[in-house]
Image (cartoon, grey):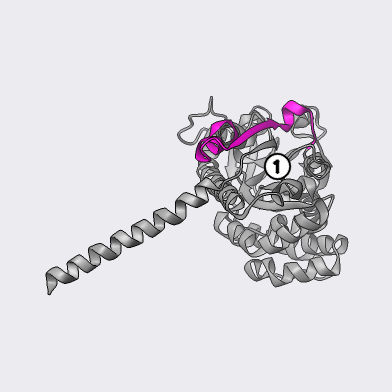
């Protein structure tokens, strides 16, 4: 009896394996041949040279058995601004765009909702907000840019870096602080500072010349751009998640069969998962490198004083989110936008937007 049972189990396993192989083979065979032209992020930062460039330089082509040929150029090489990438995608200049929500939110304020300043306290909460808000992102990309949303990736945490002592959030009052998005500007206003918009490449001289007292960017980008040579202090409290996106033009996406769409989506899911994991790892090493407080494999460490937020600093961040960031965002967003956020991201953050 036991022998018969074993034979039946072996036969069932063999049949299941054959079915699985039979299902997988046609799917692989039915991947369409195509070329993808992409625009990437900044060539001097990790997300490009460790992830985007290798992905388009061979990873996708190899995974597709040579059927999908790819090409990518970073915005720095093309001389583009961050807010231009989705306009050019819509015009058909590129098939795929990698960008930052904060830069393209000027085209659609609803996209700010995934990364409102002060809304996410850590990596876990940021990813939960993304998961909740993805249906809204998908809808807005389709409507505004005629694009298919492929995923959200993460930069290291966005901190405030200053060239003078900062021991608590209230010390930011009257400081000129570099921002790169409207929502970060709202946060700065909420703490009593003055926001100044400065291109990333121009921040170091701006800090040297007094055009800005502080600047907001990710931990590793701050080190890679040598901010530690002109700053002295930092408040290690995230004021933004530093979220980026990947999107494909519907002009290409809608020509693909289901097997090709599923294959491509899986490749981008894997890519963005790796970027999230790396960003969290980079945060700690970047803080080590900036402050000289631990192992640093990226270059000569700095000596920036890092201040951890106190309970009162966290309460101040929550107050600014509630009284400034959400209210100002709601004022420039539509009623539909507010309704969508309250039905999704607000359930994770714990605060609703009110116009």
Determine whether the residue tagged by mark 1 lies in a helix, strand or loop: strand
Q: Is residue 51 above or below residue 173?
A: above
Pointer 1: residues within 10 angstroms few (<14), some, or many (20+)? many
The quarter of the picture where the C terminus appears is bottom right
Magenta highlight range: 56-81
Name the one closer to the observer, 191 or 289: 289
Q: Is residue 16 left or right of residue 55?
A: left
Q: Is residue 268 above or below residue 208?
A: below
Q: Residue at point 83% right, 43% down? A: 87
The x and y percentages for residue 31 are 57, 46
Residue that sits furthest to the bottom in the current view: 1
Q: Residue at point 78% right, 63% down? A: 326
Q: Residue at point 58% right, 30% down? A: 57
Q: Is residue 295 above or below residue 108?
A: above
Name the one closer to the observer, 281 or 255: 255
Name the one closer to the observer, 134 or 255: 255
The x and y percentages for residue 209 are 80, 27
Residue 224, can we see it? yes
The x and y percentages for residue 12 are 29, 65
Q: Quadrant of residue 207?
A: top right
Residue 204, can we see it? no
Q: Is residue 338 left or right of residue 120?
A: right
The quarter of the picture where the N terminus appears is bottom left
Check if residue 224 falls in the magenta segment: no
Residue under label 1: 96
């Amino acid at each position: 009896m036991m022998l018969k049972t074993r034979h039946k189990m072996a036969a069932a396993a063999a049949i299941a394996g054959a079915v699985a192989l039979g299902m997988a083979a046609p799917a692989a065979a039915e991947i369409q041949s195509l070329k993808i032209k992409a625009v990437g992020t900044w060539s001097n930062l990790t997300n490009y040279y460790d992830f985007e460039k290798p992905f388009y330089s061979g990873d996708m082509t190899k995974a597709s058995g040579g059927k999908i040929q790819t090409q990518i150029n970073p915005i720095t090489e093309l001389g583009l601004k961050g807010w231009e990438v989705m306009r050019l995608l819509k015009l058909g200049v590129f098939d795929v765009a990698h960008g930052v929500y904060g830069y393209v939110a000027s085209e659609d304020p609803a996209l700010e909702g995934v990364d409102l300043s002060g809304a996410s306290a850590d990596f876990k909460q940021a990813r939960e907000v993304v998961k909740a808000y993805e249906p809204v992102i998908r809808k807005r990309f389709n409507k505004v840019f005629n694009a298919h949303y492929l995923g959200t990736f993460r930069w290291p945490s966005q901190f405030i870096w200053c060239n003078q002592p900062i021991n608590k959030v209230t010390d930011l009052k009257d400081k000129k602080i570099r921002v790169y998005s409207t929502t970060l500007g709202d946060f700065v206003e909420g703490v009593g500072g003055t926001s100044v918009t400065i291109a990333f490449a121009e921040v170091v001289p701006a800090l040297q010349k007094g055009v800005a007292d502080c600047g907001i960017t990710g931990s590793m980008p701050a080190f890679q751009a040598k901010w530690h040579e002109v700053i002295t202090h930092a408040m290690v409290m995230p004021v933004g998640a530093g979220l980026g996106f990947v999107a494909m033009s519907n002009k290409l996406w809608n020509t693909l069969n289901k097997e090709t769409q599923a294959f491509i989506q899986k490749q981008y899911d894997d890519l963005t998962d790796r970027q999230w994991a790396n960003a969290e790892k980079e945060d700690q090493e970047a803080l080590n490198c900036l402050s000289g407080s631990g192992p640093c494999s990226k270059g000569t460490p700095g000596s920036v004083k890092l201040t951890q937020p106190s309970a009162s600093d966290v309460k101040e961040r929550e107050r600014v989110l509630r009284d400034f960031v959400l209210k100002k965002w709601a004022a420039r967003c539509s009623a539909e936008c507010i309704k969508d956020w309250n039905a999704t991201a607000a359930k994770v953050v714990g605060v609703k937007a009110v116009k």
